[in-house]
Structures are given as C-alpha cells and as structure tokens.
Image (cartoon, rainbow, N blue to C red):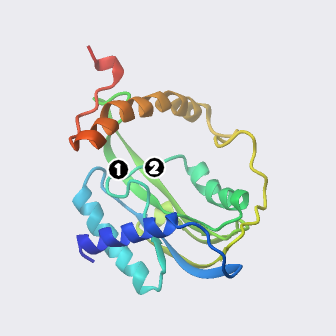
Amino acid sequence: MNRRRLLQALAATLASAALPTVAGPPARHLRAAAIQMQPRLGDVAHNLDQADRLIEEAVHRGADWVLLPEMFSSAAGFHEDTLRKAPPRLARLLGVPVVHASHAGPFHGFDSPELPDVAYDSAYLGESMICDAQGRVLARRAGPEGAGVVIADLLVPTSPPPVEPIPHRFWLPKQMPEELKDAWTRWLPRGRDYYDTVTRPYLASGEIDEYVPPYMRD
C-alpha cells in the first residue's frame, strides 16, 4: 500500500466514523482489526512503512475497518493496567464494541515535556484488543507479542444498550499508582501550554516551532 492509499484509507475511516446514525436494521456485522505497532520513536518513515504492511495484512484477512494506534506515525504509550481494563469497561459504559490499537516494544531517548534535556528509555505496553458491546474481550495482543494484527467479527448495535452506568467522576482509576496520578496532574497544564504555544500557531500558519517549557522561557 502506497502513501496515497494509506491516507485515503485513513480519511475514509474517519469519515465513516463521523456519519450520523440513521434508521435501519437493529444491528450490523463488521469485521474489525486493531493494529499493534512496534514503532521507532519519532521515526515517521519507518512507522509509516510498518503501518502500510500491517494494514495490508488486516485487509488480506478480511477486515472491513482497520484502526491504527493514536499517534501511530511517531508513537505514544500509557499505563499497562489502564490499557488492559479501559476497552472492556468503555464498551460496557457505552453499550458498543470497542476496538483499541496500541504500541508495543522498547523505545529509547524519550524527551519529557517537563525535562526536554533529560532523555530516558522505556517501553510501549501493547494491549491491543477488540471487545463486544458487553465488554467481552474477543481478541487481544499483549505487549510482548510485538507488532501484529488482531481481528474479530463484531455485531454493531444501532441503539446501544449500556451494561454499566457512567460514573459521575471519570476516568482515572482509584488503584492507579500515586506517582502516575501525580504525573497526570502535572502534565495536564503542560499539554494545555503546548497546545497554546505550538499547536494553535501551527494550525494558523502551517509552521511548527520547537516547544520550550515554561521554566526555560525568559
């Protein structure tokens, strides 16, 4: 699959997801695929090539809908326990199937928004999975399995019947380690600052500037 076909496929997926619900049969069948990538941090060309290959595999295996991980061209990752529990619970809360694609494998030299001059090594956690509308896990690929494709046949309801009520407070789990809660709390203002100083100017001008955290500004 070439770059043009990849972008066309992504655009078609986004467009189909944005279509409003219309009257019709009570449910429809869909073969979904979640792509688990083993990316190289910041290596866009390598990651696009890997996405090409895995999309081709998913299509060859009969997928109607293919989902790539968030930030698939550059990579990102989160807490393992949350990754494993979030898709089934989200399915139960909304009453719809959930297809979750993820990254897996080690990465090197990550620069934190808070400490851009202090690089560290870690790993993406994997846990790509597909759940039905009741939160049952139909297919899963753990982090140690590396890059690959998980596929499952889904029944997509027209009128979602939630299995679990949506709580008043959402989404951080109570059992999340305190150091991760602290990092989440500290990073939220950094994300807002990044959006204001980098993303919004880029959307207006098409030019992107290097991010400088507040403590390093004059």
Report x, y in % for residue 23. 66, 76
Q: Please rate how many residues cluster around mark 2, counting C-alpha atoms within 10 Å: few if below 14, some from 14 to 19, many from 20.
A: some
Question: Mark 2 falls on what kind of element?
Answer: loop
Quadrant in the rendering for residue 211:
top left
Report x, y in % for residue 15. 44, 67
Circle 2/circle 1 CB separation < 8 Å:
yes
**Which residue is under mark 1?**
107
Residue drawn at the location 68% of the way across and 73% of the way down:
158
Find the distance from the CA under tag 2 to the CA under tag 1: 10 Å
> Is residue 162 rendered to the left or right of residue 172?
right
> Is residue 170 rendered to the left or right of residue 78?
right
52 is higher (above) or lower (below) than 82: below
Quadrant in the rendering for residue 195:
top left
**Disc with the residue nearer the chain's start (2 vs 1):** 2
Residue drawn at the location 78% of the way across and 61% of the way down:
163
Q: Nearer the viewer, residue 146 or 182?
A: 182
Instruction: Report if residue 111 is visible in the image.
Output: yes
Q: Nearer the viewer, residue 159 or 3?
A: 159
Q: Quadrant of the N terminus?
A: bottom left
Q: Nearer the viewer, residue 187 or 195?
A: 195
In the picture, the disc for residue 77 is 2
167 is higher (above) or lower (below) than 99: above
* 2 or 1: mark nearer the eye: 2
